[in-house]
Amino acid sequence: MSVTAGAGVPGARTRDRGRYVWLVLILSTVAFFALCGLVGTSLFGFLTSITEPQTGVLELRKGSHLTVQRLGTTAPVYVADKAVINEGDRTTTGPDSEGYVDLFEGDITVRTYFSTTIRLDTLRTSRFFQNLRQMRLTLDTGTVVVATGSPSDYADENYVVATLDGDVLVPSQSRVRVSRQPGESGTTVVVEEGTASIFSKGNRLELGANRMVTAQAEGGFSAVSTAFEELIRNGNFIDPWTSDAESREGGGLGIAAWLPLRENSGGPDARLNRIEVITETVGSSTNYWVDLRREGPTNQYGTLGIRQEINRPVDYLERIELKASIRVVQQPDVIGGLTGFVYPLTIKVNYTDAQGSAQTWIRSFYYGQGTDADQTRDVEMLAQNRWTLVPAPGDKSERYTLKPSAEQPEPDIINSIEIYGYGTEFNSSINSVSLSGY
């Protein structure tokens, strides 16, 4: 007798269907939670990416010329006191004015100095979560100082100053000065406090406190150095004239930045009163200096020298140091004189103090004992007809340092520098003059 197997066992088929049902339920649940997670993540990401524009406050701090040009308009509007500034607005300070921009309720401040134009590109925060706070402004020309406060509650903070030469990223608790001047190549970045990251043409540089660098127009960076600012242009008298007034035909000296200074000296063509740029080549070295020579008339006092307009704000500098190479060949018979100003060479810095008053800072030079020299007036005696560096190497006296004191008010703006002789007859020379701020 034979036995034939059945087609299937009903209980087994029931168990298989149960397993399939549970598998489908489990997979569906996993898929549901995955989908919910994906949707939640996407929604959270979407919400955190939504930002809303903020506004700042623009204020005139000094002078009388501050304008704001609104986005979409062509005519700038003068700001007499304060004004709201929005994304896309452009603000410009005049040659005698300074502006101040308050952002994020004082957490970030931007100070704009003379002849500066900036555009506020971005000023935003996250709408639903404290995820992002960002500021981006473009510096067209001039100087700005950006100061950031302590880290905020936002997860990501991004503060950038952009120029044609690159971007400067300013983190929290930092103060950074960014300058891009007309006629100069590149953007200079000075970190006064904290740090900064500079990006230029695919290159990146981290800069620490009290350091400076120039992001060059062609890409890359200059050598990093101790932070300082040179206030004088063409202190070695090498650069040729750049305007008609500087040309010899226009009555200038034929060099850039400097113009002649003459008072009671017979005019620019007087045969016995000359201001000359001397060039001397010894081997492979070429030296330039300005020679001042007055030979009369002996009964008339006169001034003969050179002058440079500077007009630079310096309130962010702690001290300003004067350096020069000086030679005195001939001098009046009487030094000092009744007026106290008869010297063959004097360097005078004209500046405006924080109260808006005009001030001067003077250093004078002569040789020999001098019959009337007043040593209380910051006067130094040199060897005759010998080039002398001032201050001398190793000099710690700070007599050539301009910084606030009871006798010398704090400088706010350096207006100009004058280098001249005063008297009836004198002959003096100067080279390698600098006025550096730190």
Image (spheres, rainbow, N blue to C red):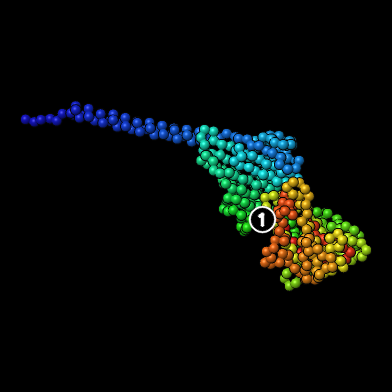
Instruction: Identify which residue is drawn at 65% across, 52% down.
Output: 188
Instruction: Identify which residue is drawn at 24% across, 30% down.
Output: 16
Provide the residue designation for mark 1.
438
**Residue 34 position (above or below residue 416):** above
Instruction: Identify which residue is drawn at 51% across, 35% down.
Output: 129
**What is the secondary structure assignment of the residue under circle 1?**
loop
Classify residue 258 by image quadrant: bottom right
Classify residue 371 by image quadrant: bottom right
The image position of residue 23, as x and y in percent, is: 29, 32
**Residue 250 position (above or below residue 91):** below
Q: Quadrant of the N terminus?
A: top left
In the figure, is residue 210 to the left or right of 339?
left
**Residue 6 position (above or below residue 363):** above
The image position of residue 40, as x and y in percent, is: 44, 33
**Residue 292 position (above or below residue 121):** below
Instruction: Identify which residue is drawn at 78% across, 54% down.
Output: 360
Query: Is residue 37 in view?
Result: yes
Q: Residue furthest bottom?
A: 283
Classify residue 295 by image quadrant: bottom right
Residue 310 versus residue 338: which sits nearer the camera? 338
Residue 415 versus residue 6: which sits nearer the camera? 415
Q: Amino acid at mark 1?
A: Tyr
